[in-house]
Image (cartoon, rainbow, N blue to C red):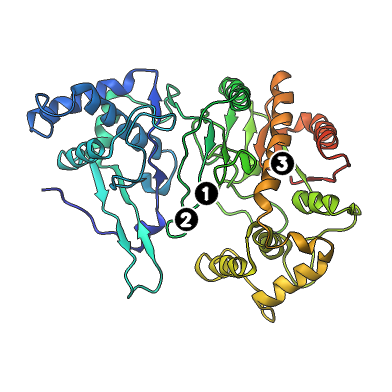
Amino acid sequence: MVIQVKMNEVDKMQSGIKFEVDYMDSSGTIDVIVDGIYEQLIRYSFVIPAHGCRADVHKKHLKVVLINLIKAQVHGCGGYVSYNRNNNYFEYRKTRYNPNNIRPAQLRTVVDALIELGYIINKRGYKDWSKQSKHRSSEASKMRLANHGLEMIKNIGVSYCNDGIYRGMEVIQLKGIKDHKTKMAPLLQYKDTHHTKRMRKNLRSYNEFISTQLVFCPNLRCKRHVVYRVFNNGSWHQGGRFYSGCYENMIVLNSEVERVSNVPYRNDIKINENSVIELDYKAFHPSILYHDAGFDLDFDFDPYIIDGLQREKVVKPIFNILINSASEKLAFCAIRYQVNRLKKIIIPVGWTIEKVVAAIREKNYKIDKYFFSSVANSLMNRDSFLTESIINYFTKKNLVVLPVHDSYIVESKHATLLHEVMITEFNKRFGFTPKIDKKY
């Protein structure tokens, strides 16, 4: 019988890293653990080689599960891996997004066997979409290494920062339209073109180069990570931004942020053991919209500054929602979700959501036609190709640049070069000179 542990409020906060189906191991050290556990699976009849899947199929599933659990040890969140036991959660056939051909049924078999053997602790998820529930909500199942599993890994000598472990992932991803219930967008299959092959070749060259450099992220003790691009809504003309899962969500320490111990900050990133600097295109998307509307912004004008409202925590996120939403109704729903549910936006006393939106529209009346037009995805597409040109320039120079959407991190000694390249590439693409800000 599989024993499940009930989730409490602390567990819900420790959501864990997402289970990834594309982990590979070139070192061979994980195979030692896999062979030992597989013998136990046969001995206790969790798998029967003569029926169903072949041994290599179960071993492959076991290997991917163990790598996910090992990687979770360096990511915090209690060492948890968040996964879904539903058959429809991911493609269960071999595709560009599932190179290991991980299947839900075999995944459940392996996870349940590891629970029975005492190697992992599992916390079963739930779905609450009942009419009685105030908000539709769900929680994926989570697993982490138990003491028995941790001891086994320690005895064999597997490093949590094993550089032989890597993502064999597709770096050019095309997603469909987000589901309004799950807020998730499915990965779409596509036929390669000259365009996608070129993007993949450039990004693989960048990833291969980065893997040879020493990039230290405070929230990631391993230096090996993969940068990939995501296009949205089934279109190569929407989205396309670069993601790494490493540094883009880290907090930037500035005058508005007080340092807290054990919290990772982007300022603390090191490239080849050197301090870094981050330069940012100031008000990138508003600048493009003003230019498209026939107006060029004065360097002193900031579309995000409104008296009585915080620029970064209130005006900017709400502005982005207004240009990302297809209608006024959807925009207000998204803002209320951020304010009331996620608590990411805090409306100050004396203000309401309606007053904030009205103030933003009044401040930016020249580009009012772009609000509630879903223009954000096409803007992200445009900034993604600007980022691609900046990445390609630095890679050819054998210099490290870390993209964070429309800002870039380099070693401090390369700040002047980055500034020049950002202005040059922007001018080539958009035809006017941008304002560059130094984040730190």
Left or right relative to 326: residue 8? left
Left or right relative to 179: residue 85? left
Question: Tag 2: residue type?
Answer: Lys
**Mark 2 or mark 3, which has the lower sequence index?**
2
Q: Residues within 10 Å of mark 1 (few under 14, many from 20)?
A: few
Front tag of 1 and 2: 2
Left or right relative to 431: residue 403? left
- Which residue is label 3 attached to? 383
Disc 2 is placed on an element classified as loop
Q: CA distance from mark 1 to mark 2?
A: 30 Å
Question: Tag 3: residue type?
Answer: Asp
The quadrant of the picture occupied by the C terminus is top right
Q: Residues within 10 Å of mark 3 (few under 14, many from 20)?
A: many
Q: CA distance from mark 2 to mark 3?
A: 24 Å
Marks 1 and 3: CB-CB under 8 Å? no
- Which residue is label 2 attached to? 183
Return the mark for residue 262: 1
Total marks in image: 3
Q: CA distance from mark 1 to mark 3?
A: 33 Å
Q: Residue at x 8, y 32 (%)?
A: 45
Marks 2 and 3: CB-CB under 8 Å? no
- Quadrant location of residue 419? top right
Q: Residue at x 57, y 23 (%)?
A: 204
Marks 1 and 2: CB-CB under 8 Å? no
Q: Position of residue 393 (x, y in %)?
A: 74, 24
Disc 3 is placed on an element classified as helix
Left or right relative to 95: residue 235? right
Question: Tag 1: residue type?
Answer: Asn
Q: Nearer the viewer, residue 169 or 18?
A: 169
